[in-house]
Image (cartoon, rainbow, N blue to C red):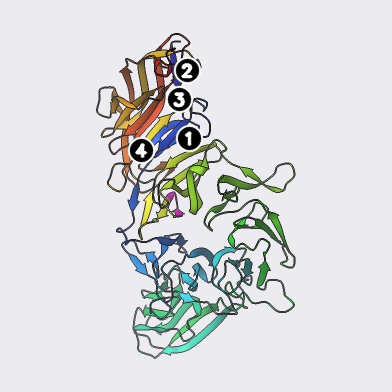
Amino acid sequence: MALHKISIFSKGVHNVLNDEQIPPEALQDEKNWLSSEGVLRLANGKIIIGTEGAAGKVRGLHFGYKVNGEKICFRKISGFIQYWNGTIWVNVTAWDGTPLTGIGATDEYSFANYSSLAGNFVFVSGDAGLFKINTANPGVCNSLYVAGTNDKGRIMIDKGRLIMWNCSDAAKTVIKMSHIDDQSATVYHDVTDNGIKPIGSQHITGTLPSASALRTCFGVEFHATVAAGVETFVDQKDGTLVSNFAGTGTINYTTGDYDVTFSDITTSAVDAEYTWENSNVDGLTDFTYTAVRVPSEGNMINQTIGGDAIEAVMIGQDGAYYSLKAQSAYRLEISADDKTFTNLVYRADMGIPFFRASVSTKKGIVFMNTANPDSPELTILQRDIYSGNVEPLILFPHFDFSNYGYDDACIDTFGQYVVIACQSSDSDFNDTVLLCDIAMGTVDIGYYPARIFAKDAGNLYTASPITESVYNIFSGFDDDNFTIENYATLKGEIFGIENLKKFRKLKIQGQIEKDQTVEIYVSYDLNDFELIGTIDGNADYVDSGSPRVVGSNMVGTVPIGGDNAATVYSFFYELKTATPKFRKVTLKFIATAMGYIDLNSIIFDDILIFENRIPKRFRVKPP
C-alpha cells in the first residue's frame, strides 16, 4: 500500500461506534474544532461584553430592535432587567424612574419582540411581573401586570397575540392567550391637546397630558407659529421629532416626556397631537374574555393530562402550537377565524427538561427529548413528505448525547447550526456548546460557558452560568485574551486491513496564521499519545508569498464578530516517522498559540504491510 489519504473532513464527531468503525472523514472526539466546508479548523473564541460580572447567573438574554433595525441587548440578572447602551449595562426602571421591585434573584425571565403602528417593543415576563419596553426608550418600561387582566409567566408572541404559560396565577398546565391586537381605534386613542404651552416660548419641556403608567404614546406632533410660519415637529418613531424648519425635539414614548426647541420664539400657543395605547385594554396584555367568548378575545387552554407543567410552547411547520412538557406533548390548533380550538395530546413519550431546551426552525421544532433521562435524543418534529403530518425524527444517531446533562439546557439556531448549551459529565454547570448541522449531519463540540443564547446579524451571544456576564462566542482567535483550549482526535486508522503496518511519512496540508503552532500527537494500538511533530506558521513549508484573508469569525459563510481578520498562508508539512509495527494508529492535533489554523488533507505515505498478527503488546506467551 503506497499511501492513505484523508482529503475532506465532513462528518463531525462520531462517538457511538468504535473509533475504527467511524467514517475516515469523522473525528472520534474534539474540543473547539469544527468540521466545516470540508476542512477541520480551530473554532473561534469568545469576547466578554462589558466587564466580568459578580458570581451568579444571567437568567434572561434577548435582542430587541429599534425601528431603524438597530439592535439592543437586554438581560436579566439578580433583581434587575438591564440593557446594554454600548458601553455599560443599565438598569431598566419603572415608568416614573423608580427601580423595579420584586424581581427575585433566581427568577427566570423570557422576552418577546413585537412591532406595530405604535412602535417596536420588547415584552418581558417572569415571576415578578409583565413589562413592556419601547426600544426607542429602553431605560424605562410599563409594568402591566394586573390580576384578573393578565398574568406572569413564559411568553411568546405570534399572529398579533401574546401567549403565556407556566403562569403565576394559574395552574402550570394552562396556556393563556391575549386579545389579538388589531391595531385599530379599539386600542389606539387619538388626542389633540391645544395650548399646552403659552405664547412666547422657544424651548419647551414637559409631559403629555394623557401620559400614564400603563400607556405608551406614538405619532407625536407639535405645532406653533414662529416668525417664519407654522413650525411642525413630526415623530420619526425613534424618539426624535423633526421640524420643518430648524428646530429639534425628542419624545419618550413610555413616560410622555418631551423636549422641544423651536427654530424661533413662538408667536402662538403650542399644540400637540398624538395617539396612545394601553395594551391591557383589548391589546397584547389583555387576557380577558366574555362568558360566551367572542373571536379575537383572550382565552385559557387546559393541558392537564399527566399533571406536569408546560415547559415550552413552539410553533410547528403546520402552524399549530406544540406544548412540550417533561413527559408528554400537546398539539393546539386554532382556526383562522379564532373560533375553533383543537387541543389534543400529541405524544406521551417525549418531553424536555427545561423551558429553553427547544427551538422552532424552518425545518421543524428541534428539542432535546429527555423523557428517558438515561438516553436523551435530539429530536425534530417535522412534516412528513408523504402523509403531511408532523412526526418526530431522531437526529444524529451517531452522536452520544448521553455524555452531557440538560437540566439547564438551551437550544437555538445559528447560521446553518442548531446550537445546544449543555453540561459535560465532570462539570457542575453548562460548559459545552454542541454545534449540530442538520443538513450536513454533523455534530461538533465547543467548550464555552453558556446557559442562554441570543443572536444578532451573524453574532452569537451567551449568558454565563457562573457569573453575571455576557459573551460573544465564536469570536476572534483567542479566548478573551487567552489561548483557546482545544484538541482534535481523528478516527482509529487501520487502513482497511488487519495486518501490522508502518508508515514512513506523514504529510499535512492546510492554512495557518503566522503566530500559530499546532502540535501533532500519535497513539499506536491504544498506547498513550506522544508528541511527534509541530506545525509552525513561520516555517519554510509555509507559502508566505500567497496570503489569504479570513474573517475573525466564520460559521459556514457568515462573518461575525466585528471587522477583525487574519492573514493566513497555505502550508504543506511533511514529517518523517519511525513507527513501531502497529495495527491501529490515531492522530491528535492541539493548537498551542493564538491564531487561525485549518487542516484540509492528511496523508499517511509509504505504508509498509507486515504479518497478520495482533500487536506485540497484546500477545500472550504460552505457558
- The Cα atoms of the two marked residues, 4 and 2, are separated by 26 Å
Is 322 positioned to the left or the right of 400 in the image? right
Label number found at residue 13:
1
Per the image, the residue denoted by label 4 is: 486
Camera-near label (3 vs 1) is 3
* Position in image of residue 578 (x %, y %): 32, 14
Residue 425, quarter of picture: top left
Camera-near label (4 vs 3) is 3
* Position in image of residue 358 (x %, y %): 55, 53
Tags 3 and 2 touching, CB below 8 Å: no
**95 over 411 or under it: above or below:** below
The secondary element bearing badge 3 is classed as loop
* Position in image of residue 73 (x %, y %): 41, 61
Residue at 42% of width from left, 84% of height from top? 207
* Viewer-proximal residue among 586 and 271: 586
Instruction: State the quadrant of the N terminus.
Output: top left
- The Cα atoms of the two marked residues, 3 and 1, are separated by 13 Å
Per the image, the residue denoted by label 2 is: 495
Residue 314, quarter of picture: bottom right
